[in-house]
Amino acid sequence: MKLSVLDYGLIDYGKTASDAIQETILLSQEAERLGYHQFWVAEHHGVRAFSISNPELMIMHLANQTKSIKIGSGGIMPLHYSSFKLAETLKTLETCHPNRVSIGLGNSLGTVKVSNALRSLHKAHDYEEVLEELKSWLIDESSSKKPLVQPTLSSFPDLYVLGSGQKSAYLAAKLGLGFTFGVFPFMDKDPLTEAKKLSSLYYHQFEEYYPNKSPNLMVAAFVVIADTSEEAENIAKTLDIWMLGNKDFNEFATFPTIEEANHYQLTPEQKAKIKSNRHRMIVGDPKQVKESLDALVNASQAEELLLIPLVPGLDQRIKSLKLLSQLY
């Protein structure tokens, strides 16, 4: 089983965004040392506790700071941007770091404020067309009807469609791309049931469209792991209050600490939401986490797990990677 990491560039209490970027570099190097397959970073705009807004630049820098681990993004949001410009960026990354770059493509436009500030070029219903256009720019280099995408080369980064629904799974299969099934987005359905259903759809449709090509399915999940279940539950309180999403995830100036979480005054409605959110994360000691991850793998027949240690403190995130690396 391949294990990979998705990092959000968390800004911890008392730290700056610059500190967080440096800690992401250290985390990527630790992931490489521990034998992880890929290290991805996310794209977020206008969230005070997340430092990474430009994953393309981070990918280049992280690839420069590591030796062999694949570096990617989970994900870039192509609805904001020109597909032509994005294709140029991806081919530049591939040229500088051949066979080391992976790109997850999401369909989020973010908040209205963010979308307006970015002057997003596309609407949500354009997603399929945008991905088809991006793939065309990456593959078709010679045409009198459109400009050349430089640098010219025959390969381009591995592409994944990010999603948690049937449309995303079908689109990934139709375009011959990888599919990253996210347990953590705003789902109100049982993850195991959805994993089984969507993976079956993806594998079946992929084989129909590309019988001579291999599909690539990855499952992504928030994971809070510690030596004991009690310790994991205590740490998970930070993720519980974070995932309430108050003020467009800007309730906290930095990612909440365990102390903040322990003193947070919850309303009955928030307690109910936290309880509901728990199916969007995996929490426990190594044995409990392994059982939950195995269940996801068995349901989805995934080839890779994308693990998200969204927990406070670089030391705790490094410890999470160490504990998770020992599970497979």
Image (cartoon, helix red, strand yellow):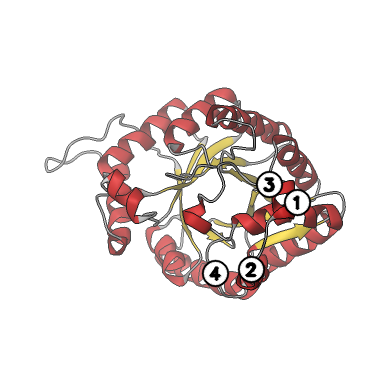
Residue contact at pointers 4 and 1, CB within 8 angstroms:
no
Q: Position of residue 307 (x, y in %)?
A: 65, 50
Mark-to-mark CA distance, 4 and 1 = 22 Å
Rendered image: mark on residue 267: 2
Pointer 2 or 1: first along the chain: 1
Mark-to-mark CA distance, 2 and 3 = 23 Å
In this picture, residue 254 sits left or right of residue 225: left
Pointer 2 or 4: first along the chain: 4
Q: Residue at x 68, y 40 (%)?
A: 36
In this picture, residue 19 sits left or right of residue 44: right
Mark-to-mark CA distance, 3 and 4 = 21 Å
Q: Is residue 18 above or below residue 279?
A: above
Q: Which residue lies under the disc numbered 4?
A: 187
Mark 2 or mark 1, which is nearer to you?
A: 2
Mark 2 or mark 4, which is nearer to you?
A: 2
Secondary-structure class at tag 4: loop
Mark-to-mark CA distance, 3 and 1 = 7 Å
Neighbours of disc 2 within 10 Å: few (<14), some (14-19), many (20+): few
Residue type at mark 4: give it: Met
In this picture, residue 313 sits left or right of residue 112: right
Residue contact at pointers 3 and 1, CB within 8 angstroms:
yes
Q: Which residue lies under the disc numbered 1?
A: 235
Pointer 2 or 3: first along the chain: 2
Secondary-structure class at tag 3: loop
Q: Which residue lies under the disc numbered 3?
A: 311
Residue type at mark 2: give it: Thr
Residue type at mark 1: give it: Ile
Mark-to-mark CA distance, 2 and 1 = 20 Å
Pointer 4 or 1: first along the chain: 4
Rendered image: mark on residue 219: none
Secondary-structure class at tag 2: loop
